[in-house]
Each structure stands twice: as structure tokens, then as C-alpha cells.
Amino acid sequence: MADVIQLEQKWTLGSQIGGGGFGRVFEATSESGQPAALKLVRKEPGAERELLFVDLTGVRNVVPIIDSGETGDSWVLVMPRADKSLREHLASAGSALMPDQAMPILTDIAQALSDLDDHRIVHRDLKPENVLLLEGRWCLADFGIARYADKTTAKDTWKHAWTGAYNAPERWHDERATSAADVYSFGIMAHEVLVGRRPFLGPDFREQHLTQEPPPPSLAAALSSIVLECLYKPAQARPSAANLVLRLQKASQPTSGAFARLQLANQSMVVAQSKAEAAASAAAQESERRAGLFTAASNSLRAIADLMRAQIEENAPTAKSSPGSHVPLAIEANGVRLSISDPKPVKPGSWGRFPPVFDVVAASTIRLALPHNAGLYKGRSHSLWFCDGVEAGRYRWFETAFWTRRSDNADNPFALDPGDEAGEAIAPIIGVYNFARVPVTIDQGDEAGFIERWLGWFASAILGDLSAPGGMPETSNGGFRRS
């Protein structure tokens, strides 16, 4: 190997500072004295893919390529010298980082993943060794097995050249990697940074990632939820990188009032949610995919119901759970009953004449029932659907409700299961059934608004001053996607 490599600039090599399956990294200095890290990647089939990512304009927090080219047997990449890797940073700390130390690191990584997702790029080898501190920012490096998400897999993709400790369940099934796989790897790293160790320690990483639950992290509720949602087994149930950025920013801010109480109540629920979630399969077959999503939906809804129950018990201790009830929520006070039904699986062919473009995996109902002697108004019920209603392939819980000019519905507004009537309300036609409330998300950081809305109605009903809506629709800005 030559001591000097001529690219656009002439680089003098120093000692080797790193290496692995994708090449060797050396200290290097330009003719002008600029220090750098120079990487030599052997010219093997697929090795040139790293050069596809020389220009990542518009992507925050990635290590830039300042020169590139080739020698007789290697591709060459030149990068700025970083201060240290995240692996080195964790080793020097010797234990978990405090949240205020970890949050800037995780936020920088999440921002990079969000921008990569916008560019349809999947890193596919996210780990602390590939996160470097450069000019005060934690940046992603080593795109040796990265790929554009919309490219078909060629035979020379280095598909199995990965780090098993950080790989998502779908990767073990040889499924196509998406940005959700990077989010899963982010969850492993977040656990390592905040807890001091990875959730799965091997040696059988395949079995652990596919079937075992992550050990519950002893963290503040907001951070615990972020970590565990990233580690959902079904890829489609994980939050997006953009969602992570927003929630990490919120988690860095002090909380008070209802939000602080919600986080405190949620802390005891996170463990139960993650235990059941581990049973879900990320199998390629459609029936197993839906089974995994349904498990995630059930766990998520029960966690939301537990948050609501905790708030009621804290602020209205005279309210009592209905005896013998095993549904997610059934609680009564002064004859008023607030309940959330068990989610039901929804078959793709359930819609009848007006099937929507989005996919509903699970359906439930939240209902507020007034006592029989309360007068003409009997209460309201809303539909809860776990679906990819806004972004194709991204499943979340949505709340919506319906109305009709017919007078045969006890609730106003009322819930509908996915079917012919709900399909008519969603379809762009003038029909008997219509939206009373446009869909809104109620999970992955949006629980507080949902809980506050229903607890407000519950309180009004207990006080006897809850009345029927003055007109329909109650909300009318937005809706499910139509393409």
C-alpha cells in the first residue's frame, strides 16, 4: 500500500485507526495540512455502493465526504477527523449516561434518520461505532450497506453484512429494510445509552430480536415509551424518525400539571405493554403481519386505557371500576359509565360497497353512557381504529365518530365498526352516514389530548351538565387519506 494516495488532493497516510468488514481507516493529511480519516474499501462486488452516498445534501448530522476516488484495488473515501465515536464515548463514561447527557446525542441521531427517511435512504448498519462526534454534533458515518428504500435488492447488496446486536426482526426474515429498521436500531442504541447496556445481549440475537421482550428500562415515562415503541416487533407499528425528533425535544422540557401526572401514571404501564408486544411476529406472510400489528394495537390501547384510569383514580377516587369487567376500561361515577371495548381484528374484506384505500387492523369503541334518568340525551361513542389512515404502512390508533339524520342511534355522535356504513361516511359521496369528527391520532405522544377530552366529558356528565352537540359535524378539518 502506498504511503501517498492522489485523489482530487494528495493524501499522506498515517497509522491505521479503524477497520472492519467494509475496509480499513487510516489517519491522513492533505498537502495543505488538513487532517482527515481516509477509508480504503476493497473492490469487491457491491463495495462501490458506499460511493453512492458521497453527496447527502440536505441531510443533517452525517459525516461528509471531502474527497473520493480509487486505487488499483480499493475505493477511497476521505472524511474529516472526528473527535470520537459514540462507542468510545460510552466506554469512557463506563455506565449509562444521564438523560441530560443522552438527549442531545439521541436527538442528533434522530434528526439524521428523519432526513435520511425524507431522502428514501436506509442506513441499515446503525450502531455506536458508526456515530461520530464532529464539530459538536453526533453524526452518522459508514454507509457501506446503506441503500435507497425504493431500489430493488441486487445480488451484491452485502445483505447479511450487519451487526446482529442492532438488527430489526424483519432483517432476520430477509425482508426488505425500510426506515423502520433504522428506528429499531435507534431503539437498541437509546437503551444502551440510557440504561448502560443493550436490551438483547446474545449470543442468539435472532431468537431474541424475533421473540423476546426487551427488559423494562428504569427511565422516566416519556423516555421509556420512546425506547419500547422503537423496539416493537412489527415494523409498521414503530414511530417514524420525525416523530422521535419531536418527542425527544418534548422529553427534554420540564413537565407539569396533567402532562406530568400522565407520565407518572404511564411509567407503571410501560412494562406490561412491552411484555405482550414481544409475542408479535414480523413474518412476511400477510396473516402473521396482521397478527403482529393486532398485538401491538391491543397493547397500545390497553396502555392508553390504563393512563385514563390512573387519572380518574387520582382526581376522582369515588369513581369505581365496573365489577367483573375485563375490557380495557369500564369505570362508573354517579351513574355515568365510561368504557373502552376490547379491540377486534378487522378483516381486509369487511368494508362492503365503499372500501377505503387505507388498512384497518383493529377496531374498538370508547363510550360515555349517561344514566337512564338523565333525560333524552343518552351519551356519545367514538370509533377507535388502528390503521395506516394518514401515511401508507404507518399504523397508529385514530379516533373518529359519525352522525346521521336518522333518529335510531342512542348515542350522538356514535361509533361504527369498519363496514358498509362507515365506508359510506368515508367515501366522497353524499350519503346517510357522515363524519361527526375527523380522525385524530391518540397514541405515540398524542395521548394527552384524547384523555383530557374524554375526562372533561366524563366530569361534565357526572355534574349533570353534559348536553347533546349543538350541530354536526363537530370538527371538519382533515380526514383519512384517499390515495
Image: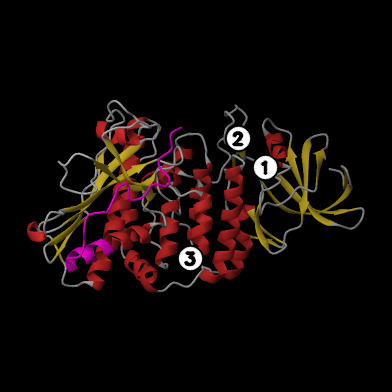
Q: Which element type, helix, strand or loop, lies under badge 3?
A: helix
In the picture of the structure, the residue carrying the numbered disc 1 is 22
Q: Which element type, helix, strand or loop, lies under badge 1?
A: loop
Please report the residue visible at 89 percent of the width from the left and 46 percent of the height from the top: 9
Instruction: Say whether marks 2 and 3 touch (CB < 8 Å).
Output: no
* Whole-number angstrom distance, CA of label 1 to CA of label 3: 36 Å
Tell which of 53 and 156 is nearer to you.
53
Q: Taking the image as drawn, is residue 181 in sight? A: yes
Please report the residue visible at 25 percent of the width from the left and 72 percent of the height from the top: 314
Tell which of 110 and 336 is nearer to you.
336
Q: Taking the image as drawn, is residue 279 in sight? A: no
Residue extent of the magenta highlight: 456-483
Residue 158's place in the image compared with 242, above or below, is above
In this rendering, position of residue 2 left or right of residue 401: right
Q: Which element type, helix, strand or loop, lies under badge 2?
A: loop
Give how far across and how far down residue 232 sits, in percent. 40, 48
In the picture of the structure, the residue carrying the numbered disc 3 is 251
Residue 393's place in the image compared with 296, above or below, is above
Residue 158, disc? 2
Q: Name which of mark 1 and mark 3 comes first in the sequence.
A: 1
Q: Residues within 10 Å of mark 1 (few under 14, many from 20)?
A: some
Q: Residues within 10 Å of mark 2 (few under 14, many from 20)?
A: some
Q: Residue furthest front?
A: 470
Tell which of 91 and 99 is nearer to you.
99
Residue type at mark 3 is Ala
Magenta span dominant secondary structure = loop
